[in-house]
Amino acid sequence: MNELVRAHPPVLVVGSLNIDRTVIVEELPRPGETVVAISSHSSPGGKGSNQAVAAALVGAEVVFVGAIGADEPGRAALRNMAARGINTSWTVEVADCPTGTASITVDKYGENTIVIDAGANAALEPDSLHAEQFSDASALLLTLEVPDRVLLAALRMAKAHSVPTILNLSPLRGHAPEILSSIDILIVNNEEFTSVASPDGPDVASTQEAANRLGPPVVVVTRGGQGAIVLQCASDERMARVPSVQVAAVDTTGCGDAFAGALAARLSASESLLNAARFAASYAALVATKQGAQVSYPDLTEYETWSTGK
C-alpha cells in the first residue's frame, strides 16, 4: 500500500514547526486557578509539521517548507521529519528567533487547551517558495500558523501550477479575505465553522448555506466523536456525512492535523473526496487513543491492523 501511494506526486506542506510542551492534569484549570500536573513531556509538533508527518506515515511523498530557530530542539524536530521520509531541504533556519513552541494542557478526558508562541514560524517569508516545489505537487496543504504573506504567495504559485489547495483554518485568527476565495478544500472543526460562517442552525439547509458563504467549493467540517461533514458547494450531492469511529479518547491534541494530512495523502493517491474523508476520520480516531500529537501518529501498517480488528 505504501508503495502504491508513493507512486503519486508529492503533497507540498507550507506550514509551522513547533516544539510541543505538554502537561497532563486531572481537570483543565479555571481562570485564576493553579493545578498540579500528573506528568509532562516535550515532543515535536506544529500544525504544518504534524500534517506532513501524518501524510508521510500513511504513504504519501511529502515536501515540507517551514522555518525553525537556530537551536537544537528545532533541528531535532526537523531530523525527526526527515527520518519519516519527508523532504525538509527547503526549511530555513532563522538566526534571531527560537523555534516555535506550543504550551498544551490535557485533561483526563483528552480535552486540551493550547497556546502558541510562533517564534521562527512568524519569520517565514515568501522567498522560501520556489516554482520547483510546485511543479510536480499533487496538493498544497496550508494552515494559519504561518503569516498571510506566505499563504498568499503559496496560493498564487499553486494557481500558476494548477495545484489543488487545502487549508486547515486553524488556529482561528484574522486573515486576509482573499485566502478563503483561493482555496479548493477548506477544513474546519465545529467551532471554527460556527465562528467564520455563523450558520443559523444545525439543519442541513442552514449548514449548506453557511458553507456556500465561505467561498471554497468544498468545506469539510470535522466534528470529533461525531465524524465529519463534507459539503460540496458546486455539486448535486452537496452534503455527505462521514460516520464517526467510536474510541476511548486519551488526548485529542493533533487529531485535526492528522485528519488533514491523511486527507491530503489519500487525495494525492486519486481517491474520491468522500473515501479520503472516511479514511482521515478513522485515522484521526486512532490518533486520539494515544498521548501527544505527532508522536501518537500510526503508520499505515499499524492503522490497518487496528482498523481490521475493530
Image (cartoon, rainbow, N blue to C red):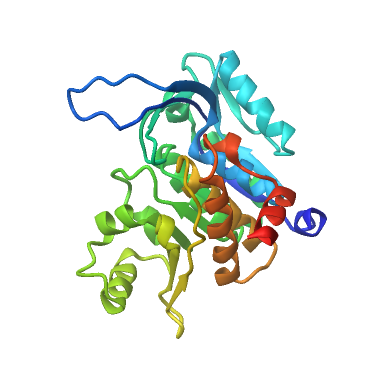
Examine the image and state in which quarter residue 181 appears: bottom left
Q: Residue furthest bottom?
A: 236
- Screen quadrant of the N terminus: bottom right
- Toward the left, the furthest residue is 32
> Closer to the camera, 59 or 285?
285
Give the position of the C terminus as an image quadrant. bottom right
Q: Which residue is depicted at the point 47% across and 29% down?
A: 121
Residue 45 spot, x, y in % from top left: 53, 32
Q: Residue 136, can we see it? A: no
Locate residue 80 relative to residue 98 in the image: left or right: right
Tell me: 23 left or right of 17: left
Q: Is residue 6 left or right of residue 102?
A: right
Q: Position of residue 127 (x, y in %)?
A: 54, 35
Query: Is 171 placed above or below 31 here?
Result: below
- The residue shown at (33%, 71%) is 212
What residue is drawn where x is 55% and y is 46%?
Answer: 287
Q: Position of residue 60 (x, y in %)?
A: 70, 51
Q: Is residue 70 above or below residue 13?
A: above
Q: Quadrant of residue 297?
A: top right
The residue depicted at 39 percent of the width and 50 percent of the height is 169
Question: In the rendered image of this protein, does residue 96 appear above or below residue 247?
Answer: above
Q: Where does the image place residue 241, in percent across and percent down from the top left? A: 45, 72
Q: Nearer the viewer, residue 39 or 229?
A: 39
Residue 230 seen in render = yes
Up-down: is 43 above or below 7? above
Q: Is residue 19 left or right of residue 60?
A: left
